[in-house]
Structures are given as C-alpha cells and as structure tokens.
Amino acid sequence: MDYKETLLEKIRRQEAVVAIIGLGYVGLPLSVAFARRGFPVIGIDIDERKVEMLARGESYVEDVEPQDLWRLQVRRLKVEGNATTPSTFNLQPSALHVTTDYAALESADVAIICVPTPLNKTRDPDVRYIIAAGEAIARHMRPGLLVILESTTYPGTTEELLLPMLSRSPAFNGEGQAGRDFFLAFSPERIDPGNKKWPLERVPKVVGGITPSCLELATTLYAHIIERVVPVSSPTVAEMVKLLENTFRVVNIALVNEVAIMCDKLGLDVWEVIEAAATKPYGFMKFTPGPGIGGHCIPVDPHYLSWKMKLLNYNARFVQLAAEVNSEMPLYWVQKVVDALNEQGKAVKGSRVLVLGVAYKRDIGDIRESPALDIIELLRQKGADVQYHDPHVPEFTYGGHTMSSVPDADLLHEVAASDCVVITTDHSTYEWDAIRERATAIVDTRGVLRKGRLSVQPEYIDDGR
Ligand code: SAJ
C-alpha cells in the first residue's frame, strides 16, 4: 500500500481528515483555517469546558470570532464504542468536530500537535503534554497517518522523542517506519495573538520532515491554508529555527534593558537614545526597555535551547545572561519606587502604590510570567499598600494572594490618592495626560510619558510593531 500517494491525493482534494490536538491560541485558529478551506477537521482537547464552549459556538481565543465557528457548524463528536472508520463519525467537509476523546484519531489522516510546552518548577522543559499526545496517537493511529508537531520544543524532540513512540505503535506491530508506514514532521507555530497585520495565513510556515515523503505531505497540506511554506532539511532544523526567532528577541530585550540601566547611570534619557538609534534605516532593530519579560513564549522558549545545550555540555551564555538581566528588571524598578517615595520623605512601608497594568504586554489580558506581578509582590514584601488597575484583568491570584483591579471609574481618583504610580503595561486605553496631571510621582517602566519623545521628530518615531 502506497500510503504517501493515497494521502497526497486526499490532501490535494481537501478530503483528508485533519485532527488538531490542543485547541488553544494555536490549535483553534489552525482548526478553523483548515475547516474553512473545506477539510473535515477533528479538534481534540482534554479540557471539557473548551470543547463544550466550542460546541455551543462560543470562542475563548481572541483571534477566532464566534461567527467563524457558526459558519463552520461546529459539532460535538460522540465517540461511541470502538469507532474505527471515518463513516462511523459521519465527518462533514468544512466542519469542525470537537471532542475530548483521543479515539477520534482513528478517523484521522493527519494529526497536528499544538499542546503547551511550559517550564517546570526548576525552569526545565516540561514535555509531558507532547508525550501524552504522542502516546495517544500511537494508541489510535492507522497506517499512513501524517503527524506534525507544532509545539515549541528543544531541538531533537521530534526525532528523539516522538519518532520512536510512533514507530512502536501497535498499528505496525511495533516496527513502524517513518516515510513508509506513517509520516512525521515538525513545523513551528508563529501565531501572534491579536496581530491583525500578520494573521496565520500570511505568516510563512517553516516545515521539516523526517523523510522527503514526510516533508512533501506536510508542505502540501500547509500550502492549502498558508501563502508561503518554507521547507527545511529536517525537523531539528525547524525546531532550532523557532528557538532562534525567540532567543533573538529575549537577548535583544535584555540588551535594551541593560542599556536602560546604563543610561540611568549616565543621566541620559534611554527613550531618546533608542528613538534616535531607530532612525538608522538599516542594521538596527528597535526594542524597548520594560519591567522585564512575560508571556508564554519569550521567557520560556530560550530555556528549551539552553537545557538541550547543557545535555551536550555546552553553556548557552547569551540565553542565561539575558534571563538574568530580564529577571532583575522588577527589582530595578522597585528601587525606583523606593527612590520616588524617598524624594517625598516617605517610607515604602505604608505608602499607597498604584500599579497600572498587570498583563505581560499591552492590550491583552494574559498575565502569564508577567513581571508586573513580581513588582507587586516585591512592593508588598516591603510593606507598601499596593493597588493595581488593568482594564483587561479584573482580578488575579499570585503567590497565594488574590487582588482585584481598581474599578475604571475610580482610576483617576486612585491615581491622585496614591503616593506613587507605577506604569507596568502601556495599554492603549490609558489617558496618560490625565494620569500625569494627578499623580504625585510616576515610575514609568514603559517610557510612555518619556520626555525624550519630543527630542526626536515625530515622523521618525516607529512604534516597533
Ligand atoms: N518586551 C519588551 N521590549 C520589547 C519587546 C517585548 O520589554 O522591545 C516584553 C513584552 O512587554 C513582553 C515580553 O517582552 O512582556 C514578550 O513580548 P513579545 O513582544 O515578544 O510578545 P510575545 O511573548 O507575545 O511573543 C510573541 C512571539 N510569537 C511567537 O512565538 C509565535 C514572538 O516570536 C513574536 O515576535 C511576538 O509575539 C510579537 O512580535 O508580537
């Protein structure tokens, strides 16, 4: 049986059943994109609430509108007994069939893994979700399945971890061969939530296959939904491409944070320095200092690279130094609060401090790894009476402590009543002039009130996105 030609034809006709494992900010948009192109799609997630919401036509991912789901007639897949053929499920083209049951994979021609790859408590890679998905696929796969890993992970995961799992599948009596009995590739996700300029379909997709047939199948599949597909020579190259992209960011953010500290010691306005440097039309890319780095990519991904390097007895110094510099920024800014209160002859202990923004970056509500939470915790430890406001985060719990946002209506009153205001997230909705007029003291970690802005002609200012 020539599984490759059979699957290639199914993909070309958009009849291949595409299963997406993990329906988060990567998996759900990907599911919608394939279903919109006419493929029958199975969306699998272990979170019953997510599956229930989708079945009701409700979206929990900002890049997927409810109407995107209504147009697809999302339906809940009930896996009855030992369904073994697609007809059992009556899968429809251009439809998204959602379920929590991995057994649905028995009807899939393609399985794309989009599960989280966090760090564990010792800041080492936690690939348990990839392992769980790999084991489920091995349990339910049919011969000829194309498996693609999209989760960001250390170089070698696809070849060293997934490949043997799939080869040992009972579907092949434990002797499956990639490129013959099944197909395996890696393709890094490049979803940037909320980025309207670069939606999924427009961002080039890098793909590396275990064999040429694996690569051909994966690139042919993605070409149906993404304008440009970029084949590379192996899954490990594709894994390393992703880590280079995000390590590049973390190192440059750390550099500009250190430049901020150096400018402070020199008595210079770092924002003026950066904006003037950004007028260089080549060989420079603007990054901006901040309270540190947050999110589920930038603070995490480079640690997957440095961890792998440690196994190879190599010390990835840039990654570690960048992590050090970035993680020290909360303490640096808290010291600025201490200085600002000291200027008023006030101790931190008992002072009212208002933190503006807890999300890890502007105009979103995601607080994962947000440095604003560390700034709040450090101030609380020093005895400050800390309040926060964030239009996107009504409340959060961190370090066992739950806080609620100051209501929008009370914001300016709280600004005026505080001994110091800390700008940690530059949400677009803030009226900075009104805040500046009422605040007794402001520590601006984002440079939104920077005096340096006026020294560089506006036409040269680039907001960096
Ligand atoms: N940050 C700075 N200074 C900067 C840029 C970012 O302090 O100059 C901070 C942000 O405030 C945030 C953290 O770093 O706390 C990460 O910011 P980010 O802009 O890198 O945003 P993320 O974490 O959403 O990164 C995602 C990544 N996308 C993917 O991995 C698919 C990243 O590769 C993108 O470049 C980034 O979005 C983007 O450009 O929006």
Image: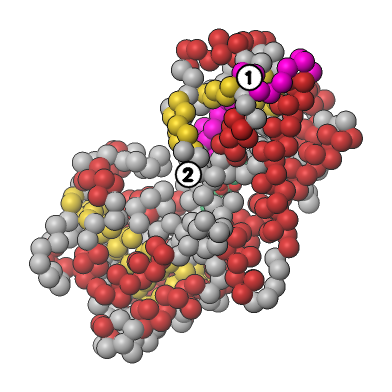
Q: Write down the residue under mark 2.
A: 193
Tell me the CA gap for discs 1 and 2. 39 Å
- Between 380 and 15, the residue placed more toward the observer is 380
As drawn, is 303 to the left or to the right of 36?
A: right
The kind of secondary structure the magenta stretch mainly shows is loop
Q: Is residue 256 visible?
A: yes
State yes or no: residue 83 in magenta: no
* Label 2 C-beta lies within 8 Å of the nearest ligand 1 atom: yes
> Going by the image, does 406 lie left or right of 5?
right
Please give the label number shown on residue 425.
none
The verdict on residue 357 being magenta is yes
Q: Nearer the viewer, mark 1 or mark 2?
A: 1
Image position, residue 443 (x, y; %): 70, 25
The image shows residue 341, relative to residue 302, as above or below, that is: above
For mark 1, give the secondary structure. Answer: loop
Q: Position of residue 140 (x, y in %)?
A: 24, 73
Query: In this picture, which residue range is highlighted in magenta?
Result: 343-366
Residue 445 as seen in the image, left or right of residue 261: left
Q: Position of residue 174 (x, y in %)?
A: 31, 87
